Image (cartoon, helix red, strand yellow):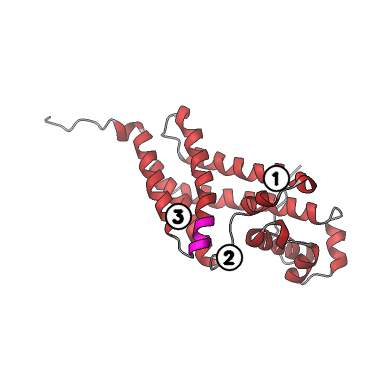
Amino acid sequence: MARPRIPDEFSPRADMLRAATRLLRQGGLAAAGINQIVAESGAPKGSLYHFFPDGKTQIAREALSAYRDAAVERYRARAQGCRSPEEAVRAFFEMGAEASLKTDYRMSCPAGTVTLDLDPESEALRAPCHDVFVSLVDAVEEALSPIPKSKRRDLAGLIVSTMQGAYIRARAARDISPFREAGENLAALAKMLTPSSRNPAPRKGK
């Protein structure tokens, strides 16, 4: 089955998915009720249940999946232009900084905001949230390929986890410094773990 994506064209279904994603990024599940999604999208309330028979859970699940695909695609495209693991690390945190500035610090990663809202009644959304994180870790791990495999996965996981904390701190401070701080320090760690950086070739004549 193909992964759900938010279509580029404007339609009631696409409008509702975009609205749900914005609301989830702003305030998690608590901010993305049916009435809020309808008001944000401008779509008729009856059409929501037409396109999403399972209601809020279904639209939240599809919004998370669409965000996952879009975020991974954006990062992979950016990482292709990076010449080293440390550049790839900085690029990841620059994405967070740009998103925070663009939205005036109102939005974070929806998987992070939704995970904090999870309770027994919303267990169906735990797996989609987890999948967002796993997919981001996969994409970052790919960008760190010069680093030995034994260290690469753990570093990618640390980078993705740190990004979630950077979103929280940036929103609290209304400042992108947490992204820059994380990017520079984890880039330094990536450089240390890159074999060619640890063991530079001897200069000629030495």
Q: CA distance from mark 2 to mark 3?
A: 15 Å
Sequence-wise, the earlier of marks 2 and 3 is 2
Q: Are marks 3 and 1 in contact (CB under 8 Å)?
A: no
Which residue position holds label 1?
Answer: 128
Question: Principal SS element in the magenta part?
Answer: helix
Which secondary structure, mark 1? Answer: helix
Give the residue drawn at x 66%, y 61%. 27
Residue 171 x %, y %: 53, 61
> Of 101 and 52, which appears nearest the observer?
101
| Whether residue 53 is visible | yes
Residue 39 x %, y %: 76, 71
Residue 133 x %, y %: 60, 43
Which residue position holds label 3?
Answer: 179
- Residue type at mark 3 is Phe
- Residue type at mark 2 is Arg
Which residue position holds label 2?
Answer: 106
Residue interval drawn in magenta? 168-173
- Residue type at mark 1 is Pro
Which class describes the residues within 10 Å of circle 1: few (<14), some (14-19), or many (20+)?
A: many
Q: CA distance from mark 3 to mark 1?
A: 25 Å
Which secondary structure, mark 2? Answer: loop
Residue 162 x %, y %: 50, 47
Name which quarter of the figure residue 189 lies in. Answer: top left
Which class describes the residues within 10 Å of circle 3: few (<14), some (14-19), or many (20+)?
A: many
Task: Please give left or right for residue 45 compared with residue 41 in the image.
Answer: right
Which class describes the residues within 10 Å of circle 2: few (<14), some (14-19), or many (20+)?
A: some
